[in-house]
Structure formats: structure tokens, C-alpha cells
Image: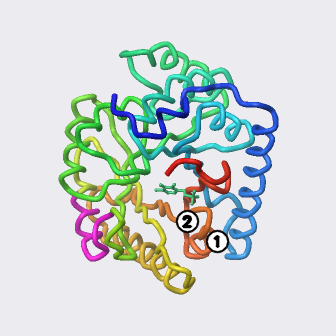
Amino acid sequence: MVMTAYMEHKNLANETIDAARAGEIAGNVHAVLDRVAAAEQAAGRKEGSVRLLAATKTRDVGEIMAAIDAGIRMIGENRPQEVQVKAPGLLRLAAERGFALGVGGDATADASNAAASNTAAATNGMIPFHLIGQLQSNKIGKILPFVDTIESVDSIELAEKIARRAVMRGITVGVLLEVNESGEASKSGCPASHAIDLAQRIGNMGGLQLQGLMTIGAHVSDETTIRAGFAHLRKTRDQILASGAPGTEHCTELSMGMTGDMELAIAEGATIVRVGTGIFGERAFI
Ligand SMILES: *Cc1c(COP(=O)(O)O)cnc(C)c1O
């Protein structure tokens, strides 16, 4: 397994954290949920129309479970190797609490026991498990047993490879098309000018369900610029839906807004905000 540097000095499979750390995460979760509710209200949007995804990169199983215990009901990982390291523990501990997590593993490897209980014990419902970071095509097979939705699809080539794998497994994978609204060279995502065409083509692929669009806000201090990117993503989503093209009817989600810009994103129609630092504190690595 490929390890990135920080994975050598932090055991991401660790399940036990101290009470002070768990309390800190719980307090943060409540504060972020309050921010979401206040932003919904300020924007005149219905309470509960925005879902809070915890961005869990560099956090261990114990930290993630503390967030779930405090009310988090959607998680997102950036790196396939982190998904693989954490999934067995997360699945087992979620099942103990009556939750099904993501796809729930499959009949291979060490996730099998957790997988068996994933759906059987799901009395409290399902916690979606998303991939939100860049995906190399040789890692697709490794994450499909665990994540139900891939938010970082930004090319036809990647979508086709995921679709092929999904059809082979006999499953349907949720996908969001990632759009580079800011045009910043450092960012992943398709060019904004290609988004409608790509969405229509991805919507037509077997094995995938196009569920919406995702973007990362512009890395600038000017709120008008950040907001314009979010507004443009919403307009693009609306145009895709209005096109009536086959397979675009579920393209409703707008995953946009992070710790620093979630209020702007919610004002512009976000349905999912992805928050890491606000829930877990500053990242020690990356
Ligand atoms: C890390 C990350 C987030 C969360 O960022 P914070 O600023 O820590 O809230 C959201 N989306 C993606 C794609 C990320 O990689």
C-alpha cells in the first residue's frame, strides 16, 4: 500500500481518543451545525436543506466516530489509501451504533465482517461515505467497496473508468462532476465551460448516477469573487436540469463551501458543505 508521509507518524486506524479530544470535536460539530442553520435562515432557505459533510483527511477512526457521535451524518475522504485504512474500523463502530456506512465493504479482505453487519444492523439509517479528493484510475477498484459517491469526477475518461468498474460489480455509483469555477491552475475540476456537456455525457453512462456538481471556492479574500463562483455552479446545475437530457434528472446536489466560505456557499444554494478544520481543528499534516 502506498503511504503518504503523514501516514507513517499517525495511526489512522486508531479507534481510541481521550475524552477531552472527543469533547472538543463534539463542541465543534455543534458550532458548525449552528453555523449551517444560521446561514440557511439568513438565506431564507428551509431548515435542513444543507447537509454537513465532515472532511476527514488526516483524522483517525476515533476522531471520526466522535464526530458521528456528535451528529455528523456524512463523511468524505480525500485519499483512497486513507479510505482503505479506516473503513474496517469505521464500518464496525458505525454498525455498533446502528448505522450503515457507505457501501459497507464487500465479501473480500478484512472488511467482510463489518460488511455483514453494515446493513443488518442499520436501525439508525445510512451515513453516506463520499470520496472528495482526486482519484487516479488505478485506485477505483479499491474504493468502490466503501464509498457510495465520488464527488471528484472531472473528466469523461475518469467517469468511463468508474462506470466500467461499477457495471462489472453490478452496482450504481453516485457521482458529482467537479468544476473548476475559479480557473486556478492549482485546482482540479473540469473547466466551467465544459461542465454542461460533460454532465450530459456522464448522465448517460451505465453504472453511474449523476447526482450534482462540486467545486472548491476561489482561494482569494474577496467575497464577491468567491460568491460568483458558487453562483455560477448553481446556474450550471440549473441549466443541466433544465436541459432534460437523459440521466440528468438527479443532478440536484451542489457540494460547495468549506470551513472558511460555507456561509457564502449556502447563500448561493449549497446542498452539501464539506468542513474539516471547523470540526476537527487545524490539520497537523498537509
Ligand atoms: C480538506 C477539504 C475540505 C475541507 O476543508 P476545510 O477548510 O478544512 O474545512 C473540503 N473539500 C475538500 C475537497 C477538501 O480537500
How packed is label 2: few (under 14 Cα within 10 Å), some, or many (20 or more)? many
Q: Is residue 267 placed above or below 177 in the rendered structure?
A: below
Secondary-structure class at tag 2: loop
Q: Which residue is at 78% across, 45% downward?
A: 24
Name the mark on residue 257: 2
Q: How far from the left and from the top, in percent, is residue 8?
A: 47, 32
User: Where does residue 221 sit, x and y in percent of width and height?
Assistant: 56, 81
**In the image, is 142 to the left or to the right of 39?**
left
| Residue 52 in view (yes/no) | no
- Residue 152 is marked as none
Along the viewing direction, whichever of 211 and 150 lies nearer the viewer: 150
Residue 281 visible from this viewpoint: yes
Q: Which residue is mark 1?
A: 263
Is 26 positioned to the left or the right of 210 in the image? right
| Image spot of residue 60 (x, y percent) | 59, 34
- Residue 240 lies in the magenta stretch: no
**Figure check: 29 above or below 196:** above
Between 130 and 23, the residue placed more toward the observer is: 23
Q: What is the quadrant of the N terminus in the image?
A: top left
Q: Which span of residues is magenta-colored?
A: 189-201
Lateral position of residue 226 relative to residue 124, left or right: left
Left or right of 269 on screen, residue 146: left
Q: Looking at the image, is mark 1 or mark 2 earlier in the sequence?
A: 2
Percent of width and height locating residue 205:
22, 49
Secondary structure under the numbered disc 1 in the rendered image: helix
Q: Amino acid at mark 2?
A: Gly
**Does the magenta stretch mainly form a helix, a strand or a loop?**
helix
Please tell me how many numbered marks the rendered image carries.
2
User: Which residue is drawn at the image coordinates 36% and 72% (left, top)?
Assistant: 242
Give the residue type at disc 1. Answer: Glu
